[in-house]
Amino acid sequence: MTPELQAKYERLQAILQEMGAVVVGLSGGVDSTLLTKVAHDTLGDRCLAVIGKSEAFPEGEIEEALRLAQQMGVRVRVVPTHELQNPLFQVNRPDRCYHCKTELFGVLRRVADEEGIAWIADGTHADDTRDYRPGMRAAKEHGVRVPLLEAGFTKADIRALARHLGLPIWDKPSFACLSSRFPYGTLITRELLQKVDRAERYLRELGFRQVRVRHHDTILRIEVEPHDFERVLQHASAIVAHMKSLGYLYVTLDLEGYRSGKMNDVLQQRTMQGE
């Protein structure tokens, strides 16, 4: 571990110690898993991991988050969240993530109150501040702490520390809520969430690790790392057949490749055009 990372690690431990007890929103991604690991190591049973069971999150991810919590020995609760009951989430405007996080943090706050714990925390880090993240406003409104950000952690720092601490998912590809697969303005329904979930699950079963499918009505746009383009083409016939079985008429490969937050490009374009 580098001296710089060691200093951030110690700062993170000090922040958690100062908090005294914490409810951590655990998604199963490397960010929230590392935060949960360090919080549990620092606070013991005064750390509670809470997994939100959401229709906008693949069942496989929820199961993995639960396995990770059990492996770490942290206390854990799985609680349902109900984003789809909020019309402001369903209509999928650019502030969709705000409404999603408002639901999640509201649930976490209720759990924290039941447990007599003052603080709730999530895995936001320094790199997240460089993208459009309306969910961060919901975090502020609910008094959510962001210890990784407070300690100065970047994504690279998180992966490095997770590897050092022996977390098996230290190099897990980035993941986001399934609602991010739809252009703003597309009405989000349970059926569409299940559709893109099945599409991505199929591609992962073929061995693609970093993958997104983007839903554009009858068109499916696949994003993978550029070095995986050739492998996509090798499986093209099977991929097309599977995606058409889900109801898509056209199946495309994004030649730019995977890039986090790509659905926000339209917002930048509108800004440049003065809309």
Image (tube, rainbow, N blue to C red):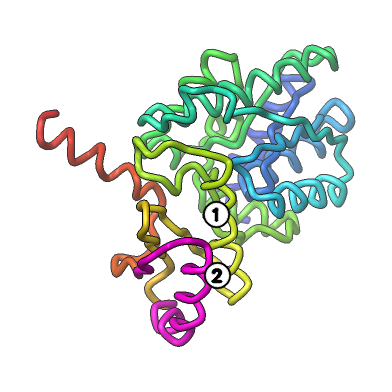
Q: What secondary structure prevails in the magenta region?
A: helix
- Can residue 30 be seen at all in this image of the molecule? yes
Magenta region: 228-252
Residue projecting furthest to the bottom:
234
The quarter of the picture where residue 12 lies is: top right
Which residue does the image show at 37% across and 57% down from the upper left?
218
Instruction: Please identify the quadrant where the N terminus is shown.
Output: bottom right
Q: Nearer the viewer, residue 87 or 100?
A: 87
Crowding at dot 2, Cα within 10 Å, few <14 / some 14-19 / many 20+, comes out as many
Q: CA distance from mark 1 to mark 2?
A: 13 Å
248 left or right, relative to 148: left
> Can you give x and y, in whole percent of width and height, for residue 259 in the image?
38, 56
The quarter of the picture where residue 274 lies is: top left
Q: What residue would you read off at disc 1?
A: 195
Q: What residue would you read off at disc 2?
A: 203
Q: How many marks?
A: 2
Which residue does the image show at 35% across and 38% down from the upper left?
184
Crowding at dot 1, Cα within 10 Å, few <14 / some 14-19 / many 20+, comes out as some
56 left or right, relative to 127: right
Provide the secondary structure element on which disc 1 rests.
helix
Q: Earlier in the sequence, mark 1 or mark 2?
A: 1
Q: Amino acid at mark 2?
A: Leu
